[in-house]
């Protein structure tokens, strides 16, 4: 067993959104990306607090870009990548033997 | 364009280094939505963002402050965390407070006492002063003058025609004995009412129906409405409506249950019964309340009252005593129900607020001492760049910490002391309405925070005024004369002045109460037990007398009992029945008539209360019962000296006859001394005593039991109660008490208030002493070096002690003078409780002055002694 603690749903979404937005991963952009993909409205405060918490945990780091000093932009750290991939694997293991298509049918 | 409110909320909660970025982004998206979906949708979106962001952003700020985390991106941005300073300050303050336990405990305890006391008194005062009455029409209901003396005839003739009123209801006392199965009867406090009462008040029963026309006419089925509490005691089920109960020996139907929290006319009443009203009845003792006509103000009904008195004068003729056309008024219901309790509650509240104020002043002085002690530390910090605001913030945090702890302790004190306080205040049945709840705890905390914020102004202002940097040089030289301390002295003078207010109030009440206790009521009060017995109103008269004799017989059998008597009304419990009589041989014209209290007693009543005949004899076996309609016999009557003097001035009254009241001729067989029949402070009033088997016994009465040893009176009460229940299960025991306690009650609210204000005055003196001690100790410490030099040069130590004590006395003296001026104005609040003493009584003021000066001198002596006896060599070496 690894020593990582599983990520929360919002934490996972935020980490993935940071990857998806690449070099432009600042608060509002991350929020918009999650909203766009999940279709669920999110408050900037919730996203920002999660980003901050993930940075405090060492899973993200933030810096200000040379082009735009006013923006705090995030990127995954090595620990963040590891945590995300372990979360993904755990999910895979959890779903093994379960066919999602049958869930749709049996609804 | 001003920034929209949601954006301001976001700005406030965001970390400083990042707020511009995020607010700009949110604002841009808001603008985009407005263009796309219109301003309403944009506004909704913005509010949603701001409000739903709050929890996350608050935890973010808290987490950063408590862990010290700061993102790398902010490494070069100034600002940082707002809350971090506060938390660091709180930690520092907590450390400082822990290392000064004496100061902390004193400050917390002092504040907690003031806060807890104020919160508790506020809890008791709230239902009396602030809470709305539980009636929808409370503001449109007025009560009438001549409360308790209207009769059915007057009411019936005016009913429906009261000028200026929509409806008027009538009620009278109507306690009833309830027999539920085989259990002994018990007494339920209640009133008998006309059917309009609940309609006038604007309250509908929670269950069942209100009284209606036809319920209060002779011959109607007897109906009652229960209070919520009584309904629950009887089972609390819905099928109680329509059930019949044996109340006062009559089967009565329960037609309704009032909602929880409803009371009228006071919270002890639990039963309202419809009173059959006889339009020709001259039976008095009713009280009227009315709902004013639309647009009328119950506080301003004078023209209508004038029309009403004219109507009364046209229809009825009144004797001089009890003339309803004189001194007529109506006043708002609230004033009538609660007005009499207001002064006591307000006086206590004022005293409590003063204690809180004293406590605040005390803590302010303590804090000031602390700040001055830290002057060099603060000066160094200020030299290193700390702003005044920053230093003040630290003081505020320390004060808030003290305040929150004190508020918690105070709330706890309030909760624990609440029942005792409710008992101690003269508020009668409202005790039941006074309930401690958590809003009081909240109030305590709120008051605490306000108090410490006020307190912190004092040291903060001293910081702002005094140049901090100067303190460094002062610290280095040891500061001969030190800093001024004028503010500190001023605070102690104020504190003593406030203590003087409370102490002089307590002294006035003490004088008044001792005056009341010095009155001779004319009866023995020691060693007399009292059992109130109530028969149902419908018991046959002769059976009632026989039962009373049986009760007396049973009580006489109890061990240690000497005499047992019974009376319909015993002394010191209010006026009761009275009527007019005139001496035989006079015409009976109004000027020949005299009012007399009318008392029906058992033969041994006088012996039981230690009343001896002045002339003639008391009742004995020769005074036989009067049978049937025999009109030839005479009634034997014992009268008091006031009666004899009024009807037969300068003559021997024994053997003389008089008429009035009873149809029979009444002959005086003996004269007894005057007894305080109605209340303690009344001037002697005529009273006549009739033998129970010759007269008539109403439903209520009291047995008085004289025990051989005075200390047994309390012990016999329980046996007496059981004896009555055994031999007369159809009688209810209304209550048991002792004559001593009745006397205490008769002394009245002043006694209870004195106990309470005495306690508060003790507290004020204690706090005052602590204040004086603190300031003098500080004063002495500042001048230590100065005195050490003088003592080394030959000044005797005793001169130092005298000097310091004199300084303390001067502070106390100044406070006393100021306080006396304030007290002269404020003690008027107490005037309704004072008996035989003016509200500016010099003896009381002198007593309070002496107490405060004595305490001032004692509090100053301790530091003075230390300063005067210390070896100067040690002091000079230390500095």
Image (cartoon, rainbow, N blue to C red):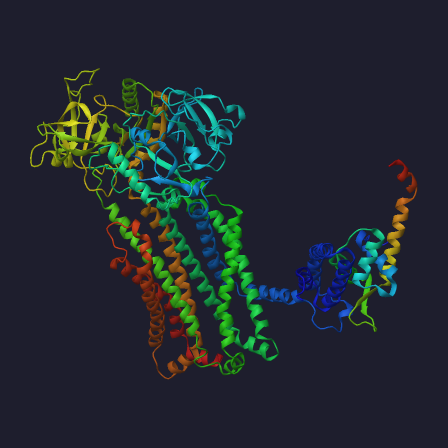
Counting from the top left corner in percent of width and height, residue B667 is at 13, 25
Say which of B555 and B406 sits in front. Answer: B406
Mark yes or no: residue A3 visible: no
> How many numbered circles are shown?
0
Residue B503 versus residue B813 in the image, above or below: above
Q: Is residue B318 above or below residue B251?
A: below
Say which residue appears at 91% left-offset and 38% top-offset: A102
Please tell me which residue lies in front, B284 or B455.
B284
Residue B3 locus on image (x, y percent): 67, 64
Up/down of B477 relative to A58, above or below: below
Q: Is residue B755 left or right of residue B182?
A: left
Q: Position of residue B763 (x, y in %)?
A: 40, 57
Residue B558 to residue B839: above or below? above
User: Where residue B397 sits in the image (x, y, percent)?
Assistant: 57, 65
Q: Is residue B355 visible?
A: yes
Q: Nearer the viewer, residue B198 or B575?
A: B198
Which residue: 26% across, 43% down? Answer: B327
**Left or right, B288 with reference to B25:** left
Q: Quadrant of residue B871?
A: bottom left
Q: Residue at x 92, y 44 (%)?
A: A96
Quarter of the figure that contains the N terminus of chain B:
bottom right
């Amino acid at each position: 067993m690894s020593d990582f603690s599983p990520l929360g749903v919002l934490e996972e979404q935020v980490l993935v959104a940071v990857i998806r937005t690449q070099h432009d991963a600042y608060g509002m952009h991350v929020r918009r990306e999650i909203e766009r993909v999940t279709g669920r409205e999110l408050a900037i405060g919730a996203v920002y607090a999660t980003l901050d918490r993930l940075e405090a945990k060492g899973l993200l780091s933030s810096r200000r870009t040379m082009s735009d000093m006013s923006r705090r932009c995030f990127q995954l750290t090595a620990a963040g990548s590891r945590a995300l991939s372990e979360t993904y694997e755990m999910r895979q293991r959890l779903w093994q033997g379960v066919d999602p298509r049958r869930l749709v049918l049996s609804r | 364009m001003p920034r929209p409110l949601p954006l301001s909320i976001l700005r406030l909660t965001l970390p400083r280094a990042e707020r511009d970025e995020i607010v700009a982004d949110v604002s841009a998206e808001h603008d985009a939505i407005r263009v796309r979906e219109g301003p309403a949708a944009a506004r909704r979106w913005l509010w949603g963002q701001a409000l739903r962001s709050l929890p996350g952003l608050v935890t973010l700020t808290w987490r950063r402050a408590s862990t010290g985390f700061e993102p790398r991106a902010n490494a070069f941005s100034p600002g940082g965390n707002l809350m971090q300073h506060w938390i660091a300050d709180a930690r520092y303050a907590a450390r400082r407070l822990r290392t000064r336990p004496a100061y902390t405990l004193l400050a917390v305890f002092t504040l907690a006492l003031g806060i807890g006391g104020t919160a508790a008194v506020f809890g008791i005062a709230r239902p009396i002063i602030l809470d709305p009455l539980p009636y929808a029409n409370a503001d449109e209901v007025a009560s009438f003058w001549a409360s308790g003396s209207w009769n059915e005839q007057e009411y019936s003739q005016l009913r429906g025609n009261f000028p200026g009123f929509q409806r008027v209801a009538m009620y009278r006392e109507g306690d009833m004995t309830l027999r539920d199965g085989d259990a002994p009867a018990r007494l339920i406090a209640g009133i008998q009412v006309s059917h309009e009462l609940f309609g006038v008040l604007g309250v509908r029963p929670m269950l069942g129906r209100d009284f209606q026309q036809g319920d209060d006419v002779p011959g109607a089925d007897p109906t009652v409405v229960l209070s919520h509490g009584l309904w629950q005691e009887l089972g609390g089920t819905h099928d109680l409506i329509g059930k019949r109960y044996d109340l006062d020996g009559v089967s009565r139907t329960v037609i309704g249950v009032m909602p929880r929290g409803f009371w009228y006319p006071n919270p002890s009443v639990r039963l309202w019964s419809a009173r059959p009203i006889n339009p020709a009845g001259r039976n008095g003792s009713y009280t009227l309340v009315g709902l004013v006509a639309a647009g009328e103000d119950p506080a301003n009904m004078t023209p209508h009252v004038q029309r009403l008195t004219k109507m009364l004068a046209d229809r009825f003729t009144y004797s001089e005593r009890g003339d309803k056309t004189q001194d007529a008024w109506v006043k708002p219901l609230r004033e009538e129900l609660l007005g009499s309790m207001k002064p006591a509650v307000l006086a206590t509240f004022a005293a409590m607020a003063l204690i809180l104020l004293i406590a605040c002043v005390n803590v302010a002085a303590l804090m000031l001492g602390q700040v001055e002690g830290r002057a060099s530390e603060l000066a160094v910090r200020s030299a290193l760049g700390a702003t005044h605001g920053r230093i003040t913030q630290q003081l505020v945090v320390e004060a808030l910490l003290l305040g929150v702890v004190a508020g918690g302790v105070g709330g706890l004190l309030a909760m624990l002391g609440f029942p005792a306080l409710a008992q101690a205040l003269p508020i009668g049945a409202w005790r039941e309405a006074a309930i401690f709840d958590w809003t009081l705890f909240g109030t305590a905390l709120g008051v605490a925070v306000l108090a410490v914020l006020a307190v912190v102004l004092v040291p903060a202002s001293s910081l702002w005024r005094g140049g901090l940097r100067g303190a460094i040089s002062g610290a280095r030289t040891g500061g001969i004369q030190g800093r001024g301390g004028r503010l500190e002295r001023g605070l102690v003078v104020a504190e003593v002045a406030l203590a003087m207010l409370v102490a002089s109030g307590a002294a006035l009440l003490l004088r008044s109460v001792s005056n009341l206790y010095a009155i001779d009521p004319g009866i023995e009060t020691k060693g007399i037990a009292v059992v109130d017995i109530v028969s149902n109103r419908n018991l046959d008269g002769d059976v009632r007398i026989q039962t009373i004799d049986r009760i007396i017989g049973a009580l006489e059998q109890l061990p240690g009992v000497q005499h047992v008597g019974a009376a319909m009304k015993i002394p010191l419990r209010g006026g009761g029945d009275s009527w007019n009589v005139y001496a035989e041989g006079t015409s009976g014209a109004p000027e020949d008539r005299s009012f007399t209290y009318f008392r029906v007693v058992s033969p041994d009543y006088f012996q039981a209360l230690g009343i001896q005949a002045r002339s003639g004899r008391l009742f004995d076996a020769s005074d036989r019962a009067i049978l049937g309609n025999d009109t030839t016999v005479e009634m034997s009557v014992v009268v008091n000296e006031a009666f004899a003097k009024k009807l037969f001035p300068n003559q021997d009254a024994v053997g003389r006859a008089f008429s009035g009241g009873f149809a029979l001729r009444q002959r005086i067989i003996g004269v007894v001394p005057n007894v305080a029949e109605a209340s303690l402070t009344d001037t002697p009033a005529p009273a006549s005593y009739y033998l129970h088997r010759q007269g008539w016994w109403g439903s209520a009465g009291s047995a008085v039991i004289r025990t051989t040893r005075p200390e047994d009176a309390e012990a016999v009460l329980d046996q007496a109660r059981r004896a009555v229940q055994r031999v007369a299960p159809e009688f209810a025991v209304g209550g048991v008490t002792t004559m001593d306690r009745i006397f205490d009650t008769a002394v009245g609210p002043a006694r209870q208030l004195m106990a309470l204000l005495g306690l508060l005055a003790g507290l004020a003196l204690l706090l005052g002493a602590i204040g004086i001690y603190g300031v003098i100790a500080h004063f002495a410490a500042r001048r230590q070096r100065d005195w050490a030099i003088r003592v080394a040069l030959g000044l005797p130590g005793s001169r130092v002690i005298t000097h310091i004590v004199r300084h303390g006395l001067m502070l106390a003296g100044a406070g006393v003078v100021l306080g006396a001026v304030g007290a002269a104005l404020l003690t008027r609040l107490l005037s309704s409780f004072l008996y035989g003493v003016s509200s500016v009584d010099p003896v009381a003021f002198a007593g309070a002055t002496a107490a405060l000066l004595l305490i001032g001198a004692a509090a100053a002596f301790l530091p003075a002694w230390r300063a005067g006896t210390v070896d100067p060599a040690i002091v000079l070496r230390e500095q």
